[in-house]
Image (tube, rainbow, N blue to C red):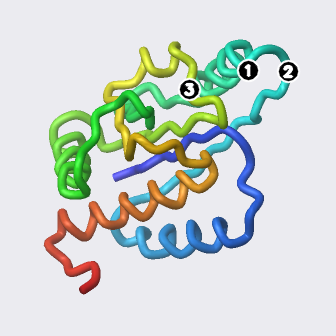
Amino acid sequence: MEINILSVGNLKETYLKNGINEYDKRLKSYAKINFVEVVESNKGTIDEQKKEEGERLLKRLKEDSFLIALAIQGKSITSEGLALLIKEVTTYKSSSITFIIGGSNGLDQSVLDKADYLLSFSSFTFPHQLMRLILIEQIYRSMKINKNEQYHK
């Protein structure tokens, strides 16, 4: 199984990098995790920035990967629901899943239209860099659920 986390912007904060590295290490026995970053746009209107970032994201997609875009208007599911989604995708559709995290302005409609699934973690808006840590923790939790392994008490 291959899981790609495709995101806008560079991760700068050490505490986030440390957390992500810890979960990446824990995930090695479950899946190959690839992190891909595209440059955040800062010129033009918000719509122009989202469009430019969207074009960059679309260029980095793998053809055979199941695409899950993180979007506030997406479907809200539980941790068990995410585990089931990952299990069903990797069993019946593709051995590769790509999670897409937009920049500070969200994802362009072109990316949302290309996605196989729109996933919402909350009605709250999270900083896109923090979302990477939240996402990788939930992926790890999903792997533990799917293997019937205890995560924590």
Residue 109, above or below 20: above
User: Which residue type does callout 2 highlight?
Assistant: Lys
In the picture as drawn, the residue positioned furthest to the bottom comes out as 153
Q: Position of residue 115 (x, y in %)?
A: 40, 24
| Residue indicated by mark 2 | 43
Q: Secondary structure at mark 3?
A: loop
Q: Residues under labels 2 and 1: Cα distance?
A: 6 Å
Q: Residues under labels 3 and 1: Cα distance?
A: 10 Å
Q: Residue at x 25, y 57 (%)?
A: 79
- Give left or right: position of 57 versus 26: right
Whether residues under marks 2 and 3 lie with C-beta atoms below 8 angstroms apart, the answer is no
Q: Earlier in the sequence, mark 2 or mark 3?
A: 2
Whether residues under marks 2 and 1 lie with C-beta atoms below 8 angstroms apart, the answer is yes
Q: Earlier in the sequence, mark 3 or mark 1?
A: 1
User: Which residue type does callout 1 highlight?
Assistant: Gln
Q: Which mark is residue 57?
A: none
**Residue nearest the observer in this picture, 152 or 116:** 152
Whether residues under marks 3 and 1 lie with C-beta atoms below 8 angstroms apart, the answer is no
Q: Position of residue 13 (x, y in %)?
A: 74, 64
Q: Residue at x 43, y 69 (%)?
A: 28
| Residue indicated by mark 1 | 49
User: Which residue type does callout 3 highlight?
Assistant: Leu
Q: Residue at x 20, y 66 (%)?
A: 145
| Residue indicated by mark 3 | 107
Count of numbered marks: 3
Residue 11, above or below 153: above
How crowded is the residue under tag 3: few (<14 C-alpha within 10 Å), some, or many (20+)?
Answer: many
Q: Residues under labels 2 and 3: Cα distance?
A: 16 Å
Q: Earlier in the sequence, mark 2 or mark 1?
A: 2
Q: Position of residue 119 (x, y in %)?
A: 35, 37
